[in-house]
Image (tube, coloured by chain):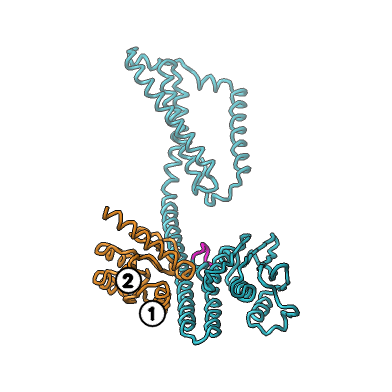
Amino acid sequence: MHADTSSVEPRALIIEDETLIAEELRVRLSRLGFSVIAAVGSGEEGVAIATRERPDLVLMDIRLNGNKDGVQAAKEIREQVDVPIVYLTAHSDRPTVDRANKTDHDGFILKPFLRRELQSTIEVAMQRHAIRTKAKIQ
Amino acid sequence: MSLPATSPRSFVPSRFLNRQLFAIVVGSSLTIVTFIFWPKLAGWLLSSNFLPHAYCYLRNPGLIWTNVTADALIGISYLAISVTLGYLGYKGRRDIPYHGMFLAFGLFILGCGGTHFVEAITVWIPVYVLSAAVKVFTAVVSLTTAAVLPFTVPHVFDLICQAKTTEQRTAELCASEERKNALLQEVHHRVKNNLAVICSLFYLQSTHSKDEETAQIFRDMENRVHSMALVHESLYGSENLARIDFAQYAQGLAQDILASHGRPTVPVCLKTELEPVTMGADLAVPCGLILNELVSNAFKHGFPKERGGEIKLTLRNDPSGSCTLCVQDTGVGIPAGLDVNTSQSLGLKLVLLLTQQIRGSFELIKSDPGTSAFLYFKVNHHAC
């Protein structure tokens, strides 16, 4: 993964309530060159860690443990930290996708298509974010 | 004057029209015959040896024209209203209960209109006998309508109640249908999620395997479960929650299998030519598992290390429901003397068992170059 030009590995945060799927994501992200700082199952924890650690990428499940769902958590993170967020969900029904699309995010992966889309979606998300950051500096 | 019909549906349109025509013809004939045999009646009815109304108005033009205009306008309006009511009562006689009441109101208002027209005429022509006759007719019709109307009130309330109940039932039905769909979606979601967790388990185990052969076994298992999970994903996303678009599914599955074998250095391309076919989960799951084995086999055995090429996926569907699924590769080809039925390969064994389950047939042919696998099966278009 060459999304970050510095020699330091980009840091990723996984917010996913199925721990086994989270673990698979951790392994896959490591193989793509990320260092996974944490994998948590609730929106509240996710927001806390994201604002404290300021990761380079957030993978966000929409259905989560706790009172906060992924769409709400993503909104709160984006209000405080400028970080690319990629939604990750098994909800392919239209209303959920529409609701998630209304919030600011950089990509969308449906869980069963993980393998096909994980790498390309993350690459696009990181690039979009890099371009946005550059535009802001200029 | 027709009494309120107890059963509006008992009127057959042609019979109803005939009855009306019959009444008009009989009425007109009786009138004409009466006037022919009793000419004095007509003379009496139209007798005008009285003073016209204009005398009462002292021939004041303002008063005369105000009265005549007002009477004419009222008459025209009453005529228009009665025509509308008559049309409504006639057109809606099968759907509007008590449509007879509409006809009664129409006739009554027609009578009222008539009295105003005659009123306008008697300003100059003093046909007071005709005027009295029209008023008597209107009085009879009004009285009958007034007498019958109260009896229909309870029925009208009944109808309102029925309409309200129907509305409520419809709303309940819609809500129950929505609940059923939400439940079905939830079931598909859970099944898919559990299958996704099983896939994760196999993936994680494959990354912890000591040797490549063991890792491959777990990757194969992951792909098999993944092909089933994709069926539920497709069902979940589909409109009717019962059938999936197999062409779309096959395309996605084949891409996933290639991605899981991922060998970026030597490209094996995927080409697809898929005709749309929809099927239920009972058929899609075995077909998906078969497709998974065929594409995986083509990739694993057809393209050993450092050999590139192409895997072509074709799906044909004829209107009778006969489907042909074909996986062709440009790989090294099957070993000479390979008998599908006695092969020790688990993949081929699964293909044969599942083919038997869907009552299809299967053949594996050495083509030049590579191998072609054909699966023939039937899709029931009406099953859900």
Residue at mark 1 = A19
Q: Residues within 10 Å of mark 2 (few under 14, many from 20)?
A: few
Q: Chain of mark 2?
A: A
Q: Is residue B194 left or right of residue B299?
A: left
Hey, which quadrant is residue B126 in on the image?
top left
Residue at mark 2 = A8
Mark 2 to mark 1 CA distance (whole Å)? 27 Å
**Residue B239 among those drawn in magenta:** yes
- Magenta range: B237-241
Residue found at x 72% / y 79%? B340
Residue found at x 58% / y 50%? B10
The orange-tinted chain is A
Q: Residue furthest right?
A: B337
User: How far across and how far down the image is residue B266, in percent?
Assistant: 56, 69
User: How far across and how far down the image is residue B225, in percent?
Assistant: 53, 77
Hey, which quadrant is residue B168 in on the image?
bottom left
Label 1 residue SS: helix
The cyan-tinted chain is B
